[in-house]
Amino acid sequence: MNAAFLITFREGLEAALIVGILFAAMRALGAQKQNFVVWAGVVMGLLLSFLFAWAFATFTSGFEGTSEKLYEGILMLVACGIITHLIFWMRKEGKNIARRLKEQVKTHVDKGSLWMIGALATIAVAREGIETVIFFQALFVQSGEQVSIMSGLLGVASAVLLACVIFFSTRKVPVGKLFEWLSYFLILIAAGLLAHGIVELQAAGWLPTIIKPLYDLSAILSEKEGLGAFLKAGFGYDANPSLIAVVGYVLYLGIVGRMYLKKN
């Protein structure tokens, strides 16, 4: 289980649960014949996600030298910020999502504005898809091409399967607890992205180096093979980091970790 799997599983599960709630609301209102609007929204969301992935890859393919380092650093900081936001957003709003969606579906069915229900599905799928593209690109840059597309696809498949179990099984799945544990892993991933983003900005000359390396663990745990390579790809492990990167990593874990635990 690596970072690619965890991210696509988490993003895929949220999208699948929202779509499942929409279908459940349509069934409760006796509007199953209009389920096609939800499916249309899902397809549109996927198309928008693929379009964003293509545009994002096209736009970022021309960076070289200092510009490339600057782009990579900013990308990792943006990914870190988005992950942090979604962790706390889900913690705050997660309990109310189902109720709000069902209320919106009822309103739109009563008004006959079915296209708005499709729009809800489109927004849910496209949002998670776009976030996944950004996270994947950040992980790709951080890990040095060690991000597995297969792990990402397995994460999505696992999320969809679990969503089906949640909606069609008689057994109760502790979704809240699952998202909580996923959030702990995402905090570690985000901390690694922050630290690596700092390193890239230092390479671009936008941040001072001060001390680099602060220490060197290459002889003990190399980031190029084995466990070190896995930790680098998943959680941003750096065998010979700079002082500022270590400070940023520790501060992020201390501040964000404490805030999240306090909310729990």
Image (cartoon, rainbow, N blue to C red):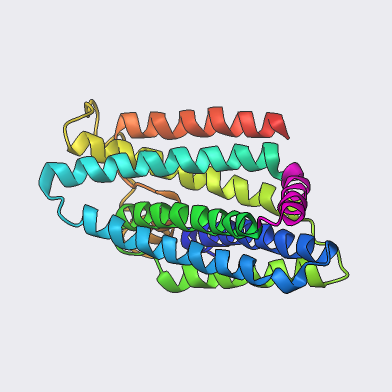
The x, y position of residue 15, in whole percent, is: 60, 59
Relative placement, left or right, of 213 versus 149 is left
Q: Quadrant of the N terminus?
A: bottom right
Relative placement, left or right, of 15 versus 168 is left
The quarter holding residue 21 reads: bottom right
Residue 97 visible in rendering: yes
Q: Who is closer to the viewer here, 157 or 98? A: 98
The x, y position of residue 202, in whole percent, is: 22, 34
The quarter holding residue 234 reads: bottom left
Region in magenta: 95-113
Residue under the image location 40 percent in, 49 percent down: 236
Q: Give above or below for 180 relative to 248.
A: below
The x, y position of residue 50, in whole percent, is: 39, 65
Whether the magenta-drawn stretch holds residue 153 is answered as: no
Residue 241 visible in rendering: no
Whether the magenta-drawn stretch holds residue 108 is answered as: yes
